[in-house]
Image (cartoon, helix red, strand yellow):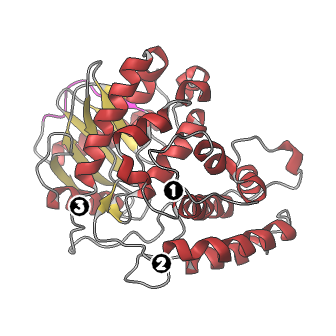
Amino acid sequence: MAPLSTTLAQARARQALRSSGLAHDGELTHASSTRNEVFLSEHHVIRVNRQPSQRLSREAELCAAMPNLAWAPTVVAYGGEVGADYLIVERHRGGPLSRWWPDMDDNQRARAISQLSDILQELHAIERPASVPFIDSPPQMLNPVSVGNPVSPLYEGLERLSKIPTVDLDLVSLAKTKLAEMAPSLDDHTDNYLVHGDVTFENVLWDGQRITALVDFEWCRGGPADLDLDVLLRYFAIPHGHVAPDYVDRTRPQDYLRAPQWLLDAYPSLFSHESLANRLWTYALAFEVRDTLVNPPPSNRRSISDLHPYHRFMNLVSAGGHVDEILSRLVFPRPSRSPISF
């Protein structure tokens, strides 16, 4: 018997179908998600947001304003009330690339990265629809350009971190010092074109031969293309931190060691900024500070796992984290990378 929470969630999904005039009596399959209730019917994906944010309505408006591309979501219906807004899109073939990846060989993996690169280049060329509002709290604690200095929220976040008793004040001070050095790399930060914002392989559908879709555009917004690179490099470094519990044990970082190089080879302009290393470090800090504020370290810091955001924050500030580790392994077409110095 399904848990009561799943039964109630399924009832909400059926109500969303019913309210949209769609068939609602067929089989629904529960799909994993970290933020929404998600169910799959034969032809549709039904997502219900239980938070009072109406974020799925924003996503629906954004997707409706995008060009009609084969890999993009096709919105069928959206609506609902605060605390139960829903979005229904057409279902694409395939399943999360992250589930396929452990059983793929290097040729298949490189082909998938090449296809993803083509899709991202199309996405990064789409102008941000002016009618779609900004996201109040994006994954990276940065301002949209039109609001002000991109790193102002990050400085504020570091100040809030310093008030948490279990956070090392010397580490926060070091982060502020390094941020002052790195922040000028974002002087040309733009938000004129779209980024996906959450392009992990959980949100890339693969049918065994090709990528059929990108899904979950909740964090899609205007921003520089290398914001998506930040997301991808974090995923490549700790893929087991981004997948559903039922296959976390099969998701191994060593299977992703060559993925950054394949991405560089397929989409070199994504890595082309002359201050790329500094930008990626700043993006990573903006992500880890936000995540640490949401999940502060416990009193016994020795008990936290490597996946805890505070552990990632410590590693990033003290040793460059996954950014330094991945960039040091890449072979660029020309020796133009600005190193991170620690």
Q: Which of 168/256 is in front?
A: 256
Quick one: label 2 or label 3, which is nearer the N terminus?
3
Q: Which of 323/94 is in front?
A: 323
Choose mark 2 or mark 1, whichever is in front: 1
Residue 235 in the magenta stretch? The answer is no
Residue bearing mark 2? 187
In the image, taking residue 114 as reference, residue 277 lies left or right, namely right
Report the magenta residues as a range.
23-31
The amino acid sitting under disc 1 is: Ser
Residue bearing mark 3? 62
Residue bearing mark 1? 336
Q: Main secondary structure of the magenta part?
A: loop
Residue 49, visible in the rendered structure: no
In this rendering, is residue 54 above or below 131?
above
Q: Residue, x 54% and y 22% (percent of image)?
A: 247
The percent coordinates of residue 189 (x first, y second) are 42, 73
Badge 3 crowding class, 10 Å Cα cut-off, few under 14, some 14 to 19, many 20 or more, is many
The percent coordinates of residue 1 (x first, y second) are 46, 20
Residue 25 in the magenta stretch? The answer is yes
Q: Residue, x 16% and y 50% (percent of image)?
A: 77
The amino acid sitting under disc 3 is: Leu
Quick one: label 2 or label 1, which is nearer the N terminus?
2
The amino acid sitting under disc 2 is: Asp
Q: Which quarter of the image is occupied by the C terminus?
A: bottom right
Q: Which of 223/140 is in front?
A: 223
Mark 2 → mark 1, Cα distance in angstroms: 19 Å
The percent coordinates of residue 291 (x first, y second) are 62, 58
For mark 3, give the secondary structure: helix
In this rendering, is residue 4 above or below 37?
above
